[in-house]
Image (spheres, coloured by chain):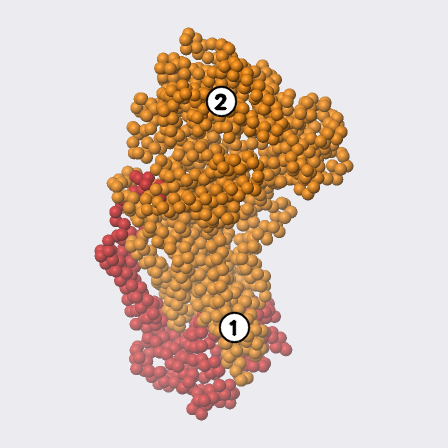
Chain colours: A orange, B red
């Protein structure tokens, strides 16, 4: 019964747990005061005090709306948009006689538009709700005081003070106080990946007084009161006091707190009391409201709308000015001028005696009339288009991860075009760039390098060199061409990717130093804290380790014949190959001490007694601390090993040095006494003393070799990063990992390269450490700040001094320094330095720092930022960035829930940005430009016409022509453009990543372009109006002598407008499928159909449209001829511009298009690489020039 | 294919051959059309005679308004028109008003379609203020448009021989049949207060009042022609056509002009050089652009001729910047 045995292990003996003992700190004196006022009555829900406090339940809601507030709130959201508000006001005013057209013809499109948007909001919120419901209805066991047993209930029904039982691999339903666990001493393991992204298990430890509460019956009498801090978002602190057993006051710390959304691991069950529920839990407090993000284009669009508004106001003003003058003149010295208007007997709107009032009212009319300048359907069309674009993103087969059956998901559709403008990517590391699984790939034993596996970095390097033969891997492996056999056998065993026939299958006994090899693997098999788990059926052993690295070592040892199969409190047992006899024997080692790993020690040791009664100290640790601890005669392979470690590190591997020593019985006893003494001491500096004691024994080591573990990159990450870098997107890595690891990964994913210079900013310097020891917080802070500031300045100076050379820099900064670098006074210079570096890596950064860095980049550079991450620790960053992309990987769904886009693999980011982002950006910006064009072209014809009606506010067209303009005659082709248009195919987008810069530099939505389109609209409207009005001015337009009247002119002009704007669309799209054809020509056809249908309604309904096409226009050749000339001439300016521009000042996409059409664009586009750099530079410069 | 956005598509690109073809073909198509329209327009004979000024007696020249508003003055006026070319029948007779805003918002809405259409809606005079009703009941047809009906009349004679002006088919059929009721008779029209324009014969239903129907079909622009009638005889060149005008309509107060127009038509309608010229101009412009494009194309080589500009994929040097 391995499980049972494990339960009996007293972990407090295995580890130096005494340091976990809680003690009252300064904060505890705050209990009961402001900010620390929470009182929890445990297992006492009927207590009147508890009832009175009534903390909120465990129900969690992340939706934006509720059923009740949906209508008002979403309406409010809608009318926050200026344009919508304008149309609402117009619709209201249009019921008055001021309106130049009927009220319903304004109201109908507005209702369609608002309704569609609200429907979209509702659907999106419904999805969020479904996820909430899932979480709220998860099951948990809660103690029922009456029946005395644990009963199942839903998460949302839990209350503060409830006793819950949580089983292995379950999530904690709320923030709990750990009372006891299946282990006697009340420890439990917790996985907090959802909170901080760290995959190692964290140990939680209950108070001694409660750890005995392991019997369900014992809870019958359990009553306690917890006084603690109020809900807050700090994941790393908890202050509270437990009042238990009649006034016993016990301090509580984070050690006793199990946080919601973390998971119980390696522990069969725990009992806990709920302290915080629902939105009070730390994780929910951390989740700020998802900010409603708006894309830059949309914000710019608002500015354009303002421009249009001012145009609207000014032309209305011009109109009303002249109208006032004309009206005033209507009665002159008692005489009527335009007697047919009966100016003496009129309403206030036309009263010459009150001309200025009439002019003012006319101004209001004008505001309504020219409302067609503001595209009412713009917002809704954009929303529709974005939803459809999102569907394309969701459906993209190339972003579908078949292994996990996960497609890409666009969770918001607001930001599609923003994807095409990303300037900086801020990426998490673990789980985002890497798979978060470690693989043992290489080792160096006794100065010989083993392991033929190629790492991702080596593969990338080899590829960059243009060939596969002399890869770095072959420096270690003697046989060439080993890549292929690595490839096909890859990851057959998780965590093990070591291929070397010299060591495998017991062959190591034939190597030069078999004894060293034996000890080496013994160290790997013994020096760890993993727990074996023997599968009874298959006899296979799996391990549960604190970190994936450790698991990789144990697995490696197992695969090479040192199978760790049993751990007891005091011993570790292995199946081992005895190289002398060649037989498999079971050996057990008596475990005497574990000297734990810590970030300051950077090593771990165990002291064991083997079966030969030898005392051994087995040690593994970082090279920086290990080499100095070697004994004189233990440095036999030092040079070779160092050499190998360097190469491993260059290959992006995580290395550890393995060493051992034999201990003399005397020496050990002396040391042990001292060590135990320091361990049980209660002085403040106990930890340091323990470390110092450990130091004393961990010396005079004998070097065995080094291991190299690969934190395996996700598939395609280096290629993806390379592509993104080619698209000139900056990439920052923000990781909680330690600096060495981060740098290694930086190399692995080609963020850092050998030729790059590193600028490292760290506070890990002796003087700072010394200050820290003194414990004066203020002086530490001051010194740290100064030190960071100095390092930043030095970095900048270093970059400036080497500006001429093409040396690139990589900035690496650790979390502590980052905290100071993000202070107000250093912020700017830090950003300055960071933007000058090609890549930036921030290690040891907390979730908050990640968010702060994101904010700094976002506001500091003003460019679009994209954050990508997979853990709950990335949530802040994802929400802070302009775009948050969540990796829907193994680490729960927190990041995905907070993200705007979710993809399954980092490499899909390439397609998401370069293809979808580019397309969406292009589509949306084209679409908006076109929208303004078409509405200006239309709106200005109204103005020109009104000018010919003595500015009386008369519209040229029938009311319904106008209200259908934006809805039926012109909107569908625009939507087709927004959904389907593509300048170049996906393949070419990926092939020419620089194309992406069109979005980053916002070339397609620059002011010249926008104004150009607007100007084009004005030109079109002038051509339409003046050509039609001049050619139809007086004379008959038919053979039967009929002349063009108001009705016919309206139809002619409108026909020309519909043709022009739709053909303009046809000219400006690059991608004609049947859909585009259908919509464009369909819209034009629909206009005629509409005219026929509407015209056949009774004249009281159709008014000026009655049979106008059938009877008056269609039989007239003149009508058709006029349409043709007007349409062609209004398209001429744009067409000529495009023809010349494409040819003589092509944009980047034009070039690619031309090359594609010429057929010179093939997969093997050749050419000599030598002069490339220069030309690339020119092209980049051109791109920048265009922008400025 | 659809979800991968890889539908079969035509991807038009403005390559030089395409551009040149497009411009040249527009030119080639438009110029003949322009010539044809001009030719057609040339065959139309049009006589325009402005009479508002000349029909004011010399003693009223400085006070034309008093003349036109007075009921005492003789409004008859005789004009002699020389036919420049042979005019084939039918010859359309128009009156042309200038600076008359039939498209004024107050004016254009001042009518009631229900009332015009059916007797049942006689009392429906919405939108007709101030010409909606009198003490005796509603005005039919109500509204400013009807009230200001044009009331000049023309009588044509050739060497003292009266030429009949036919009012047949000068209105749109749809107007006559569907907008103006055959059972709606004028009532209380021009009966009180200020008299606007023409009076209507109360015994003729609105659907037969062709002048009213023509007038009620409002003009789009302040200068407009309306059909007065048709002369269904041919007029020879140099014939002297005498027109007896009753100059009743007041255009003097707003400095408008009144013109009498006689015109034949062709397939493009009346005399219309503008369209032909526009076609010629646009066609010519297209040819010009095509030529300049070709010239530029030949003189100025394409700036990015070298295909290696785009060969990014060979060299990852793009990284190093």
Judged from this view, the residue extending furthest toward the left is B298
Please say whether residue A207 is visible from this viewpoint. Answer: yes
Please say whether residue A918 is visible from this viewpoint. Answer: no
- Mark 1 vs mark 2, CA separation in Å: 105 Å
The chain holding disc 1 is B
Judged from this view, the residue extending furthest toward the top is A581
A256 displayed left or right of A592: right
The chain holding disc 2 is A
What residue sits 42% from the left and 91% below the top?
A: B58
Judged from this view, the residue extending furthest toward the bottom is B59
Judging depth in this view, the residue of B264 and A504 nearest the camera is: A504
Q: Tell me if mark 1 has few (under 14), some (14-19) or many (20+) residues whose alpha carbon lies within 10 angstroms of its own.
A: many
What residue sits 61% from the left and 36% below the top?
A: A237
Judging depth in this view, the residue of A1156 and A1040 nearest the camera is: A1156
Q: Which residue is mark 1?
A: B107
Q: Tell me if mark 2 has few (under 14), some (14-19) or many (20+) residues whose alpha carbon lies within 10 angstroms of its own.
A: many
What residue sits 30% from the left and 28% below the top?
A: A470
In the rendered structure, are the residues bearing label 1 and label 2 in contact, judged by CB atoms less than 8 Å apart?
A: no
Mark 1 against mark 2, which lies toward the viewer? Answer: 2
A442 displayed left or right of A210: left
Q: Which residue is mark 2?
A: A698
Judging depth in this view, the residue of B205 and A458 nearest the camera is: A458
Rendering coords of residue A723 (x, y %)? 37, 40
Rendering coords of residue A685 (x, y %)? 58, 30
Rendering coords of residue B268 (x, y %)? 35, 67
What residue sits 48% from the left and 42% below the top?
A: A787
């Amino acid at each position: 019964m391995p499980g049972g045995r494990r339960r009996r292990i007293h972990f407090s003996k295995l580890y130096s747990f005494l340091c976990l003992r809680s003690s009252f700190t300064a904060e505890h004196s705050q209990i009961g005061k402001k900010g620390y006022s929470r009182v929890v009555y445990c297992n006492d829900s009927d207590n009147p005090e508890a009832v009175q406090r009534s903390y909120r339940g465990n129900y969690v809601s992340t939706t934006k709306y509720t059923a009740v507030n949906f209508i008002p709130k979403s309406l409010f959201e809608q009318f926050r948009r200026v344009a919508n508000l304008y149309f609402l006001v117009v619709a209201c005013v249009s019921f008055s006689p001021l309106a130049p057209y009927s009220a319903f013809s304004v109201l109908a499109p507005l209702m369609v538009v608002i309704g569609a948007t609200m429907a979209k909001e509702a659907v999106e919120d419904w999805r969020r709700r479904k996820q909430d419901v899932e979480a709220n209805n998860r099951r948990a066991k809660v103690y029922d005081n009456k029946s005395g047993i644990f009963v199942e209930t839903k998460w949302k029904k839990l209350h503060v003070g409830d006793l819950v039982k949580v089983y292995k691999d379950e999530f904690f339903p709320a923030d709990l106080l750990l009372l006891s666990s299946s282990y006697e001493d009340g420890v439990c393991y917790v996985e907090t990946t959802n909170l901080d992204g760290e995959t190692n298990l964290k140990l939680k430890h209950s108070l001694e007084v409660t750890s005995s509460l392991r019997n369900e019956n014992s809870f019958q009498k359990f009553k306690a009161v917890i006084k603690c801090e109020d809900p807050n978002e700090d994941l790393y602190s908890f202050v509270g006091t437990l009042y238990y057993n009649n006034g016993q006051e016990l301090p509580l710390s984070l050690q006793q707190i199990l946080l919601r959304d973390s998971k119980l691991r390696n522990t069969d069950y725990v009992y806990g009391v709920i302290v915080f529920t629902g939105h009070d839990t730390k994780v929910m407090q951390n989740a700020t409201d998802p900010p409603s993000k708006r894309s830059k284009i949309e914000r710019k669009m608002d500015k354009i709308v303002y421009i249009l508004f001012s145009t609207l106001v000014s032309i209305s003003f011009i109109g009303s000015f002249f109208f006032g003058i004309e009206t005033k003149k209507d009665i002159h010295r008692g005489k009527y001028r335009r007697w047919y208007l009966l100016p003496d007997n009129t309403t206030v709107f036309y009263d010459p005696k009150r001309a200025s009032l009439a002019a003012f009212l006319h101004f209001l009319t004008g505001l309504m009339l020219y409302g067609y300048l503001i595209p009412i359907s713009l917002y809704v069309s954009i929303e529709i288009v974005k939803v459809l674009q999102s569907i394309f993103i969701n459906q993209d087969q190339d972003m579908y991860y078949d292994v996990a059956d996960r497609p890409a998901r666009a969770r918001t559709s607001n930001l599609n075009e923003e994807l095409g403008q990303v300037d900086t990517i801020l990426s998490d590391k673990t789980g985002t760039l890497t798979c978060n699984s470690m693989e043992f790939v290489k080792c160096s034993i006794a100065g010989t390098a083993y392991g033929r596996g190629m790492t991702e970095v080596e593969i990338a390097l080899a590829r960059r060199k243009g060939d596969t033969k002399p890869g770095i891997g072959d420096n270690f492996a003697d046989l060439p061409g080993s890549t292929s056999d690595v490839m096909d056998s890859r990851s057959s065993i998780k965590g093990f990717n070591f291929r070397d026939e010299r060591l495998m299958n017991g062959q190591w006994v034939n190597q030069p130093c078999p004894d060293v090899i034996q000890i080496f693997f013994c160290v790997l098999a013994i020096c760890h804290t993993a727990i074996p788990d023997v599968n009874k059926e298959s006899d296979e052993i799996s391990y549960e380790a604190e970190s994936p690295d450790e698991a990789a070592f144990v697995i490696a040892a197992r695969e090479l014949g040192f199978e760790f199969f049993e751990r007891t409190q005091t011993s570790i047992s292995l199946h081992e190959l005895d190289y002398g006899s060649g037989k498999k024997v079971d050996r057990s080692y008596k475990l005497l001490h574990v000297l734990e790993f810590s970030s300051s020690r950077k090593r771990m040791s165990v002291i064991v007694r083997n079966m030969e009664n030898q005392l051994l100290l087995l040690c593994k640790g970082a090279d920086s601390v290990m080499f100095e601890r070697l004994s004189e005669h233990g440095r036999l392979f030092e040079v070779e090993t160092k050499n190998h470690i360097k190469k491993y590190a260059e290959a992006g591997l995580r290395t550890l040095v393995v060493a051992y020593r034999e201990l003399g019985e005397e020496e050990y006893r002396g040391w042990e006494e001292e060590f135990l003494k320091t361990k049980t001491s209660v002085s403040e500096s106990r930890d340091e003393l323990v470390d110092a004691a450990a130091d004393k024994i961990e010396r005079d080591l004998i070097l065995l070799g080094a291991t190299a573990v690969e934190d395996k990159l996700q598939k395609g990450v280096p290629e993806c990063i390379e592509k993104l870098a080619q698209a000139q997107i900056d990439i920052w890595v923000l990781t909680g990992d330690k600096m060495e690891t981060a740098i290694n990964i930086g190399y692995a994913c080609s963020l850092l390269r050998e030729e790059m210079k590193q600028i490292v900013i760290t506070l890990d310097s002796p003087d700072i450490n010394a200050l820290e020891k003194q414990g004066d917080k203020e002086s530490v802070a001051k010194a740290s700040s100064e030190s960071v500031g100095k390092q930043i300045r030095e970095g900048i100076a270093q970059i400036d001094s080497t500006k001429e050379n093409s040396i690139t820099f990589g900035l690496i900064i650790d979390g502590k320094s980052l905290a100071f670098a993000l202070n107000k006074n250093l912020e700017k210079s830090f950003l300055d330095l960071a933007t000058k570096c090609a890549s930036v890596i921030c290690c040891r950064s907390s979730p908050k720092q990640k968010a702060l860095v994101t904010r700094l980049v976002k506001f500091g550079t003003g460019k679009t930022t994209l954050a990508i991450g997979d853990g709950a620790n990335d949530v802040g960053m994802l929400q802070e960035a302009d775009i948050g992309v969540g990796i829907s990987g193994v680490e729960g769904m927190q990041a995905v829930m907070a993200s705007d886009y979710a993809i399954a693999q980092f490499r899909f980011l390439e397609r998401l940005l370069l293809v979808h982002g580019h397309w969406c950006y292009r589509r949306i910006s084209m679409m908006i430009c076109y929208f303004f064009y078409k509405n200006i072209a239309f709106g200005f014809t109204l103005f020109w016409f009104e000018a010919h009606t003595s500015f009386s506010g008369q519209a040229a067209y029938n009311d319904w022509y106008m209200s259908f303009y934006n809805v039926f005659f012109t909107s569908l082709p625009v939507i087709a453009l927004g959904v389907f248009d593509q300048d170049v195919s996906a393949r070419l987008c990926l092939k020419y990543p620089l194309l992406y810069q069109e979005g980053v530099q916002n070339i397609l939505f620059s002011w010249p372009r926008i104004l150009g389109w607007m100007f084009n609209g004005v030109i079109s409207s002038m051509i339409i109006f003046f050509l039609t009005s001049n050619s139809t001015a007086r004379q008959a337009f038919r053979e039967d002598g009929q002349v063009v009247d108001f009705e016919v002119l309206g139809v002619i002009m409108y026909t020309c407008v519909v043709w022009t704007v739709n053909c303009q669309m046809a000219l400006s799209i690059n991608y004609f499928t049947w859909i585009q054809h259908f919509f464009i020509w369909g819209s034009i056809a629909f206009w005629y159909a509409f005219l026929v249908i509407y015209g056949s309604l009774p004249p009281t309904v159709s008014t000026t449209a009655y049979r106008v096409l059938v009877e008056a226009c269609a039989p007239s050749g003149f009508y058709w001829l006029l349409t043709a000339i007007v349409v062609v001439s209004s398209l001429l300016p744009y067409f000529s511009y495009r023809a010349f521009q494409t040819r003589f000042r092509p944009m980047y996409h034009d070039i690619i298009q031309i090359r594609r059409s010429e057929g010179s664009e093939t997969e093997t586009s050749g050419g000599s690489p030598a002069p490339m750099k220069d030309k690339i530079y020119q092209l980049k410069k051109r791109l920048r020039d265009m922008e400025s | 294919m659809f979800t991968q956005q890889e539908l079969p598509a035509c991807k038009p690109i403005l390559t030089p051959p395409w551009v040149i073809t497009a411009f040249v073909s527009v030119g080639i198509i438009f110029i003949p059309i322009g010539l044809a329209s001009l030719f057609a327009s040339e065959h139309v004979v049009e006589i325009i005679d402005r009479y508002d000024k000349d029909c004011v007696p010399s003693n009223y020249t400085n006070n034309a308004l008093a003349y036109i508003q007075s009921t005492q003055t003789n409004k008859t006026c005789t004009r002699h028109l020389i036919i420049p070319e042979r005019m084939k029948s039918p010859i359309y007779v128009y009156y042309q008003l200038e600076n008359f805003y039939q498209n004024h918002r107050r004016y254009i809405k001042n009518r009631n379609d229900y009332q015009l259409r059916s007797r049942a809606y006689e009392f429906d005079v919405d939108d007709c203020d101030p010409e909606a009703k009198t003490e005796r009941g509603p005005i039919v047809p109500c509204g400013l448009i009807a009230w200001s009906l044009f009331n000049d009349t023309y009588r044509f004679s050739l060497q003292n021989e009266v030429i009949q002006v036919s009012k047949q088919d000068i209105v749109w059929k749809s107007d006559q049949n569907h907008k103006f009721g055959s059972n709606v008779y004028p009532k209380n029209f021009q009966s009180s207060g200020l008299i606007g324009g023409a009076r209507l014969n109360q015994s003729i239903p609105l659907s037969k009042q062709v002048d009213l129907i023509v007038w009620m079909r409002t003009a789009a622009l302040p200068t407009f022609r309306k059909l007065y009638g048709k002369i269904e005889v041919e007029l020879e060149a140099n014939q002297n056509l005498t027109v007896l005008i009753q100059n009743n309509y007041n255009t003097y107060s707003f400095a408008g002009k009144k013109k009498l127009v006689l015109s034949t038509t062709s397939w493009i309608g009346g005399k219309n050089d503008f369209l032909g010229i526009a076609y010629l101009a646009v066609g010519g412009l297209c040819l010009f652009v095509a030529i300049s494009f070709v010239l530029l194309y030949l003189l100025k080589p394409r700036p990015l001729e070298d295909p290696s500009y785009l060969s990014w994929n060979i060299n990852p040097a793009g990284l190093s910047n």
